Amino acid sequence: MRRDVLKPVLRRLPLEAQSPVGLVVGMVSFAFVAVVGFADGGYLQKTWRLSLLALLAIAAAALLARGRVELRASALGMVGALAALAAWTALSTVWSDVPSTPPAEAERTLLYVAAMLVVFVGCSERSLPYLLGGVLAGITADCAYGLLRYLFWPPGRSPVEGTLLFLPLGYANALGVFAAMGIVLALGLALWTRTPAARALSLAPLLVLVPALSLTSSRGAWVALPFGLAAMLYVGGRIRSAAVLVPLLGAGVLGGVLIGSSGGQAISILGQNRPQYWHVAWKLFEANSLLGGGAGTFGNYWLHNRPTGEFVQDAHSLYLEMLAELGPLGLALLVVALVLPLLAVRRTQNNMLVATAAGAYVTFLLHAGVDWDWEMPVVTIVGLSCGAAILVGARRGRAIALGLPARAALLAAAAAVAVYVSIRIGAADLLSVVLG
C-alpha cells in the first residue's frame, strides 16, 4: 500500500502507537498468532511448549527493555488466578486416575499465564491499537491460508470434519470462533478509526473472515458472534437502548443458528452430542465432587461411561470440564481470572478500543462454554489477550510500579519455567527416538 494512503491511518494512531514500540507490539502479536495458528493452532504438546518458551523470552525482553512498567490489581489478579489454576492443575496428579495428564495440562495453562504477562508488561494503553490490529492480522493470515487451500488445493474429505473448512487449526469449530473474533475486531477497529483509508484497512479482513466462518458451518461461532457484536456496541456507547439491542441480538442469534446449520446439520444451537458429553462430565464431578477427577481425565472417564460408541477427549465446555476435572476450586480460579476483565468494562465509558476487545472477549467466553477452545491454544490466547487488553485500556485506580526486585523475581520465575519446559521437550524427544 502506498505511503500516502497509510499516512492518515498512522496519524489517527496515538503517539506511542506511532513509535517503534507500537510497531514491535503489532509485529509480535501478528507473528505469534499467525505462526501458532499455522502449527495446528498449538494443539500438540511440543508446539505449546515451544510457544511457551517464546512468550517467556518476549516477557523477559519487555521486563528488561521497558523503562516503567505498572500493573493494576486487576491485572495481577488475572495472572495470579491463572497461575494458581496451573498449580492446582499440576497438583491434581496426586489424586488423578491418569497421573500422566496433569503435568501437560498445567504446562498449557502456564502458556496462558505467560501470554497474559506479555500483554501486561509489554503493552500500554496507547499501544492497544497495534496489539488488536496485530492479532487481527494474524487471524486473517491463518484464515486466508485455510480459505486458499479449501478453494484451490482442497485437502480432501476429512473423516472427522467432512468437507468443512478446518485448516490450518485442524478443527472447524475452532477456526469458526477464530474468524468470529476477527470479525468483531475488524468492525470495532473500523468504528474506532476516523479516516476512510483507516476504516477501509480495518474492514478489509472481512473479505477473508466472513467466507471462512461460513465454510466452517460452526453454529457455536455464529451464535457467539452477535453476542460479541452486541457487547462491543453497548460498551462503546453506540447502542445503549435495550429496545434496539435485544431485537438485534435475537435476530443475530436466529440468523446464526440458521447459517451455522446450513452445512446439512440439524437446526439447533447445541447439536446432538454435546448434552451427552455434559451429562458424563457431570457424572465425573458427582463422583469426585471435592477435588474433581484430575486434569485431563474426562477422556478416560468418557471411555468407561459413554452412552454411545463415539470417542471424545473433551467435554466440549470449558466451565463444566473444569468443574469435573478440577472441582469447585479449579472452576472458581478460572472464573476469577475470566470475570476480572468484564468487571473492568464498567469503569470505561465510550472507549471504542476497550469495547472492541470486550466484544471479541465475550465471543470467546460464550464459545468456550460449548466447545473445547481451551485445548486450542491460539484461540484461547487470542481470547485471553482481548481480556487483558480490556484491563490495559480500562486502567483506573492505584497502579503498582514494578521495581528492580519485582522484575528480578519475574525474570527468575520465567527462567525456572523455561528450564523446566526445555527439559520436558528434551525428554519427549528422547522418548520418541527410543520408541521410534
Image (cartoon, rainbow, N blue to C red):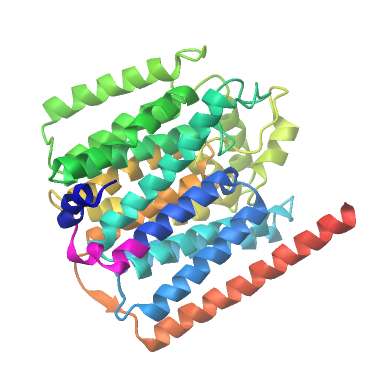
Q: At x 13% / y 51%, what residue is drawn?
A: 349
Q: At x 34% / y 77%, what residue is drawn?
A: 66
The main secondary structure of the magenta stretch is: helix
Does residue 182 show up? yes
Does residue 370 show up? no
Q: At x 47% / y 48%, what residue is drawn?
A: 380
Q: Is residue 246 left or right of residue 123?
A: left
Can you give x and y, in whole percent of width and height, for residue 379 in the image? 47, 45
Q: Is residue 41 left or right of residue 309?
A: left
Nearer to me, 348 or 158: 158
Q: Is residue 255 left or right of residue 231?
A: right
In the displayed structure, 48 sits above or below 24; it is: above
Nearer to me, 318 or 94: 318
Can you give x and y, in whole percent of width and height, for residue 402 in the image? 34, 80
Q: At x 35% / y 66%, what residue is drawn?
A: 120
Extent of the magenta region: 13-24
Can you give x and y, in whole percent of width and height, for residue 149 in the image? 55, 30
Number of numbered discs on residues: 0
Can you give x and y, in whole percent of width and height, for residue 44 in the image? 65, 48
Residue sitting at the far bottom: 405
Nearer to me, 160 or 202: 202
In the displayed structure, 9 sits above or below 78; it is: above
Nearer to me, 125 or 137: 137
Q: Would you say residue 10 sits in the magenta stretch?
A: no
Query: Could you say which quadrant of the image residue 210 lies in?
Result: top left
Query: Could you say which quadrant of the image residue 258 lies in?
Result: top left
In the displayed structure, 229 sits above or below 290; it is: above
Query: Could you say which quadrant of the image residue 169 lies in?
Result: top right
Q: Would you say residue 21 sits in the magenta stretch?
A: yes
